[in-house]
Amino acid sequence: MQIGINDIRARLLACVSFLICSVSHLAVCQVPDPAFQKIHDEWKAIDSAPPPKDFLPVIHDLKAFRNSSGGKSWQTDYMLGVAYCRTPGNNNQKAGNQFLDRVRRSLLAPESARSAADQVMKWCVSSSDGPEDSPTFQLTSVAGLNQGGVLNKGGYEMPHGDSTEFNTSQESEPDILIWDNRLFPPSKSAEAVAAAKERTLGFYFQGGAASGFVIETEVGRPADVGICMAKYRSALQTEFGMVAPANLITVYALVSDVPRLADHLHLLKMPLGTVAYSVPLDLSIVGIGTGEHCGTLAHELTHLFIRQNFGDSPAWLEEGLASEVAVSIPTAAGFQFIPSWRDVVLKRDWQMRPTVPELLNLTWANFTTNDPKEVEHVAAIHAMAASFVRYLDAKKKLVPLYKALRDGLSSDTPQSDVEVFTSVLGKSPDQVDNDFSAWFVQNATPVHTPF
């Protein structure tokens, strides 16, 4: 049923005393993850104690938690960054900065967390012991999920006719949400379908459980959409070793008017050019798609899977991979990446593209803009990220680099992303940029991919 805003706020006030709230694009309130709460309390006890502070025991526990499903979050990275920075030794300072850099570039971390990470990084290079107190802000977690901002595919990437048109906004701030009856295990697929039907009363959907998804579709059979989505899910699992969320993903497949359903389902005000979005907190995908063409929905599926498996993924890798998956051919062995309209955009806007060294240092903020003057530049960034992923795949380096970056902070001697990149590719980022430029000239076949 539709929950009114006043009811939502009243219920939020009732749960504040014993629930942890997470604010990152979405304001939500859910039962805290017990595993996270335990490790957070252990870290907080040490962080709040008078010096000397011995963080070595909690570093071990934090790294074990980070390697668990959903553990690669900005919160875990922040605690590890502080712990390493407060542990004497140059190698520990380096490791601390690497974890904190992930926080600084995170899509999901609030501004207070990014600011705190910047402060601690400055301490890391100025003192071997660090300050007595950390910056004050609330670390939060939600059971079973990395905190989820809305991830949406909008006008920066929408081909239209023989050219590409772009919106100037991709994100909006929603009202407070309560996530009731939206997460179901596979064993309760019938209940999940009934709940999805109730949420979409007034819309002309056919619903059903299909291929491990809950499907609500405007056109065609739910089974066909499920079969299409299952091909992409299987390719993500086979090629990248991604683990699917434990609960069912609900897919709302539309033929038009994504913003209207976004407002109804999630109280989100999306720009008119939005063609799809996903919400990790209720494992939902809303977007344009059918049983025959579900690439746009697969783009969002990639985001959900990366949230689950590599929650602190670099922006260029996550967005580039999701963009290429959308126009790929899923096979039993993985993905076949092919030239697409993104190459046309990059060729057109080549002078505005980031070089490979610049691409590696971009944050999620670089992938959006509200300034009409910056739209073409942001479009070039999206196109560069996508084409560079295809280049890495052609060089047989995409999967090794994905896994190395995912696991690069898990070793006893954490490596920076640039160190991992250089090690996997055997070249410096500048050298790779030269090679990419030569490859792109030969492989950017002008094509048109109809929406």
Image (cartoon, rainbow, N blue to C red):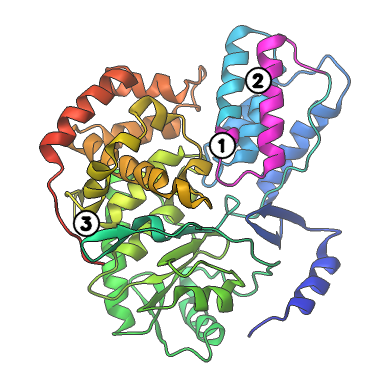
**Mark 1 closeness class: few <14, some 14–19, many ≥20 residues within 10 Å:** many
Compute the Cα span from label 2 to label 3. 41 Å
Residue at far right of view: 50
| Residues at circles 2 and 1 in contact by the CB criterion of under 8 Å | no
Q: Is residue 105 magenta?
A: yes
**Mark 3 closeness class: few <14, some 14–19, many ≥20 residues within 10 Å:** many
Callout 1 amino acid: Arg
Is 173 situated left or right of 193 in this image? right
State how many labels appear.
3
- Above or below for 88 versus 243: above
Residue 121 location (% of width, % of height): 66, 21
| Residues at circles 3 and 1 in contact by the CB criterion of under 8 Å | no
Q: Write the start and end of the magenta stretch as one range.
A: 102-131
Q: The N terminus appears in which quarter of the rendering?
A: bottom right
Residue 364 location (% of width, % of height): 51, 43
Q: What kind of element bears circle 1?
A: helix
Is 329 situated left or right of 2 in this image? left
> What residue is pinned by disc 2?
84
What number is the disc on residue 330?
Answer: 3
> What residue is pinned by disc 1?
66
Callout 2 amino acid: Tyr
Compute the Cα span from label 2 to label 1. 15 Å
Residue 3 location (% of width, % of height): 69, 81
The answer to which of 280 and 151 lies nearer the viewer is 151
Q: Main secondary structure of the magenta part?
A: helix
- Above or below for 65 versus 264: above
Question: What residue lies at 79% left-to-right and 78% top-to-bottom?
Answer: 6
Callout 3 amino acid: Pro
Question: What residue lies at 51% left-to-right and 64% top-to-bottom?
Answer: 283
The quadrant where residue 182 appears: bottom right
Foreground tag (2 vs 1) = 2
Q: What kind of element bears circle 3?
A: strand
